Image (tube, coloured by chain):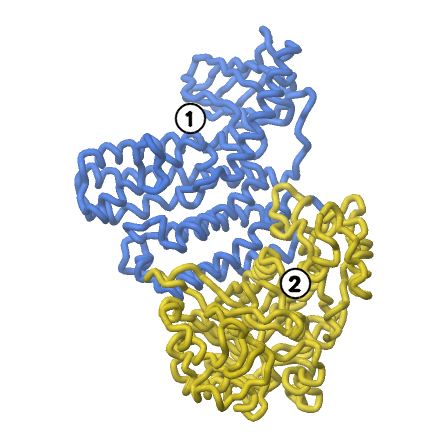
Amino acid sequence: MTEHEGTTTEDAGAARTAEGHAPSRRSLLGWGGAGLALGAVAAGGTAAALRTGGDAQPAGADATSRSAVAFHGRHQAGIATAVQDRLHFAAFDVTTDDRDELIALLKEWTKAAARMTAGDTVGDGAVGGLAEAPPDDTGEALGLPPSRLTLTFGIGPTLFEKDGKDRFGLKGRRPEALIDLPKFPGDNLDTARSGGDLCVQACADDPQVAVHAIRNLARIGFGKVAIRWSQLGFGKTSSTTPDAQTPRNMFGFKDGTHNLAGTDTAALDKHVWVADGAAKGKESWMAGGSYLVARRIRMHIETWDRTSRKEQEDIFGRDKAEGAPVGKKHERDAPHLKSMLPTAHVRLAHPDSNGGIRILRRGYSFTDGTDGLGRLDAGLFFLAYQHDVREGFVPLQRRLAANDALNEYIQHVGSALFAVPPGVRGADDWWGRELFA
Amino acid sequence: MRAHRSSVVAALAAVTAVTAVAGCAAKNDGKGGGKGAIEVTATDSSCELSAKEFPAGHVRFAVQNKGSKVTEVYVYAAGDRIVTERENIGPGTSAEITAEIKAGSYEVACKPGMKGDGIRQKVTASGKGAPAERDPKLDAAVAAYRHYVQEQADQTLPAAQKFADAVKGGDVAAAKKTYALSRVGWERTEPVAESFGDIDPKVDVRADGVEKGQKWTGWHKLEKSLWEEKKISGDDKKLAGQLITDLKDWQKRVGKAEITPTSMANGAKELLDEVATGKVTGEEERYSHTDLVDFQGNVEGAEKAYELLKPVVAKNDPALAKELDKQFKAIRALLDDHRDSKSADGFASYDTVGKGDRKKLSDGVNALAEPLSKLAAAVATTK
């Protein structure tokens, strides 16, 4: 677990209830002793018998899904943080060409993000204030707990250079690892769902809280940035907490059994975080950061559902019931790759087939209704963090795109790569500060 | 056409309620009524009143025109809102005007020759419940805006007449050419027109906005005939006449619209909302695809309101003024990208504007409308 986990900023004493202040989200909750209760949970999980306000749920049962994740730290929250249930991911185009204006926005965004992840409203809040003017906060998260909201900020290659133009004097600071992703066989990328100068990944246990966060950031950004595309996700498809049950993807299979654990600091340092030593000179601003690949992978649900169970299991290299690798009994049994088909997904994706490459996956299922032909527009919104895509995602996806039996049932339709800077260190720090220094 | 009541309407409803209450109270205490009418003596060069201070309530003005020209008499509230008026008072004749007047400051104007701003006298209606004094700069902004709105209505009539004549004459080509241009003044000042409630559904409703039992009238019905059916029916010719009648009603009522600095500010934002919900999507002018003309009209109307409020905004929130200046400039530049000198109305047909360009326009509208939504707060707070 990183420093983001187990720490909670939930603090009833911090909720502003003083007269003259618009109520914050938390102060509307009416939890007199919530801070104390959650503190006790964090300390040792002994508060199971405590109750939160009028809720019938014991505090221990829902403390994890309601509490706040610390915003400040060496790394950004939302990477090693235990995966929340819901996602709203947004990619932005920067529409201003004024560097100072962009910096001002990033400061304002960081301020709003710190407030929202703590369960507070943006600015002067959603109620009160002038009757004739729209409130600062849009208000749909009023009364909801922080719901473990994390906001993770990234920077796309096009912020450094676009159409040969050094847009903000940052060209010289573009990291080597922030490549233009190559075209992979089978890609059918929609430019309107790809790329972006900036991104914000909002994860929360309540979709309303995640959507609220992106909506308010977009609103703050109008005139400086515009949303290029966004994606809602549900049903996390991988877990960063090995003790939790592995979730199933839209194909009905357990996915992400051997994902990197958010608690495995050695593995995170090796595979996910950009090491101080690796980030020198023009790249020094990325020390402690990571790289995020986002791929919208459409699944051909209807044809998959007409496929025999045996074929489905052969394609994955696991059984459908337990998620056990071919020839094994339990999900977490070590797979014997050679007993799988050479085109089996697990065999191709396994670190042993890829020189030990590991990436931290954080994807979500998505369903955007139906596609007009009556087919479910659904699939996997693949999110993965790693310290260098040239060693991680790129060779892995090359191998999969060329060989994976699953390719008959999936298509990559959106793609983006972002440099995710290190965490915001304190109240005066802001997203991307070291890049603009 | 808007599905919801604009905030201008809401503000009007609130004010009407207040007026009614004040009126009743004044009547009950019996003051201001009776025989003591205020005498207004109008000449070609003067406008004399027998009293410049009187109790609020039911007030009578006895007007005598001693001049040589036909005159008219107006009672204006702050921001040049017409409280009451009487036209066509011939030389040597007299007339009586009555009105419920609540406490506050007013101006009485005589207009010899029925032209211009008139010869004005300040008067005060005394009593309880007088509204707080407003920054005179804001009153001036409201008055200037009302002047603008009136001017737009006045200029719309001849343009609409041209269009109506073409329809009545069965000339499809001429009607198509004059259609979009006949709407410009309306689009510039739509929130004020909408505040009357009954005119907008008659002249600017789209097919999907027609309620059960309502006859579809106005611009968009004719738009459909011209572009979709490509012919003018006998009914259409009647509708063209009805359009002019309804627009004349609008022209006449503009002076009485309740306009406040905040309703002006929110009206500017609402004009951008109109762009965001109807024009950027191409829904407003779905047959003619002249959406960019409306777009431009909405932006111009919003900018006018902003320019008039700017002296106050620049003082209260200089950063906001700077941002708005920048975003108005940016949206004008975006619109300029779509000008077409060969088109009758000066803009490209919206169905030729691609997805990417529509997104740019939409982003531009968001960039302007968001700071514009802060305008009301900037004029409501005095620093």
In this picture, is A159 found above or below B308?
below
In this picture, is B312 found above or below A93?
above
- Element class at badge 1: helix
Residue at 56 percent across and 90 percent down: it is: A352
Q: Which mark is residue B113?
A: 1
Q: Residue furthest toward the bottom?
A: A355
| Closest to the observer, A294 or A280 | A294
The residue under label 2 is: A149
Alpha carbons under labels 1 and 2: distance apart: 70 Å
Q: Does residue A54 appear left or right of residue B226 in this picture? A: right
Q: Are marks 1 and 2 on the same chain?
A: no
Q: Amino acid at mark 2?
A: Leu
Palette colour of chain A: yellow
Q: Which mark is residue A258?
A: none
User: Residue B91, position in %: x, y?
Assistant: 42, 16
Residue at 37 percent across and 64 percent down: it is: B355
Q: Amino acid at mark 1?
A: Gly
Palette colour of chain B: blue
User: Residue B270, position in %: x, y?
Assistant: 50, 46
